[in-house]
Image: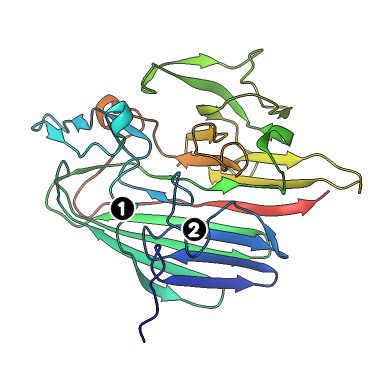
Amino acid sequence: METAASPSGEQWTIRHGEHEAVVVEVGGGLRSYTHAGRDVVHGYAVDEQCSGGRGQLLMPWPNRVRDGRYSFEEGKELQLALTEPPRHHAIHGLVRWSLWSVADRSDASLTVACRLRPQQGWSWSLDLTVGYLLDDEGLTVTPHARNVGMTPAPFGFGAHPYLTATEARVDELTLTVPAVTSVDVDERLIPCGTSPLEGTELDYRGGRPIGNAVLDNAFTDLEADSDGRWRVSIERPAGGDGTGVKTTLWADAAAYPWAQVFTGDTLSEPLRRTSGVAVEPMTCPADALNSGTGLLTLKPGAEFSASWGITPAAAS
C-alpha cells in the first residue's frame, strides 16, 4: 500500500547534539528547527501545507514586485504571475513551490538544489543550492546562485523563518533590531522612501517590548557586530521561574543590507500574533526589480553566496 505524501514532500532531517532541523522537498525550506526539544522557529506540521511563507526561500527576489511587471537592462517589459492577488503583485520569487533535490547530505548538514528555468515573466536560467549546517552555535544557512544562462540575470535573495522564544503571543516579546533606517511604503506596501529611526516608535536598537505594535517593516543601515554580522533577536522576559528565552537571527551584513520584521497580524486565526515573529534577511527590498535598489546582476557564470543563521533559544 502506498504511503500518503506529505504536502511539503520529502522530509530531510539533520541533527547535531540537541539541535534538530527538518528541510522539505517542496520549496527547499526549513519546516522545523528545535533545540533541546524546544522550538526555535515556529514551523508547521508534516501533514500541513506551508502557509504565510513559513521557512521558505525567496528567490530570485524577496517581497513584492509592483503589479508583477518590470524590465531589466532596458529589455522588454516582463509580466510575472500575480501571486498576491489582493494587492495585484508578484511576491517572494519563483521557487517557493518548486521541487528541490538533495545534492549532499551528512548527519548534521544538507544541501538542496533546484534549477530555475525561463517561464512566464522570467527569462534566465539559474542553478540554485542552499546548504543547511547544524553545529554547537546553531543553524547556518548558505544560499548559492549561479547564472548558467547566456545573458546577465537580475537576482535577489530572502528567507522567511518565524522565530519563537516559547511565547504564547508576540506581544510578550522584547525585540531588538540594530537598524538606523526604516523603509517607507505606500498603501500597497511598495517602498516610497526611507526614514531615520532615531526617537521613533520603530527604533528597536536598545530592545523594546513589542506589546500591541503591528510590524511588517523593512529595516536597513543595520549595524554589524565585530564579526561582520548584524543580529536581530526576540526575547521572552524572565517569568516566575526566573529565566528568559532568547532567539537570534544573524546575517552577513555586507550581503544582507535589509531585514523585514513581521508580527503576523495578517495571518489567519489561530496563527495571528501567536506563531512567532518573521525575521527575513534580504539582499534587496521590495520591488527591487523595478527600483534597482540592492538588485544584483549575475553575468553568465557569475555566482552569489552569503550565509545567515539562527542561534537557538537559550535560557538566560
- Is disc 1 placed on a helix, strand or loop? loop
Q: Residue drawn at (37%, 56%), measured in percent from left and top?
A: 144
> Which residue lies most toward the left here?
76
Q: Dividing the picture into quarters, in which one does residue 21 lie? A: bottom right
> Which residue lies most toward the bottom here?
1
Query: In the rendering, at what x and y percent does residue 120 appear?
Result: 14, 44
Q: Is residue 12 left or right of residue 304?
A: right
- In front of the other: 132 or 1: 1
Colour pattern = rainbow
Query: In the rendering, at what x and y percent does residue 90 appear?
Result: 28, 36
The residue to which callout 1 is attached is 95
- In front of the other: 207 or 222: 207
- Is disc 2 placed on a helix, strand or loop? strand
Question: With respect to residue 27, does 220 lie above or below?
Answer: above
Residue 28 appears in view: yes
Query: In the rendering, at what x and y percent does residue 37 appear?
Result: 71, 65
Which amino acid, mark 1? Val
Question: With respect to residue 207, does 296 lie above or below?
Answer: below
Residue 288 appears in view: no
Mark with earlier residue (1, 2):
2
Q: How crowded is mark 2: few (under 14 residues within 10 Å), some or many (20 or more)?
A: many
Say which mark, if any, is on residue 238: none
Q: Residue drawn at (29%, 58%), measured in percent from left and top?
A: 98
Q: Dividing the picture into quarters, in which one does residue 40 lie? A: bottom right
The residue to which callout 2 is attached is 30
Q: How crowded is mark 1: few (under 14 residues within 10 Å), some or many (20 or more)?
A: many
Task: Count the labels in the image.
Answer: 2
- In front of the other: 33 or 231: 33
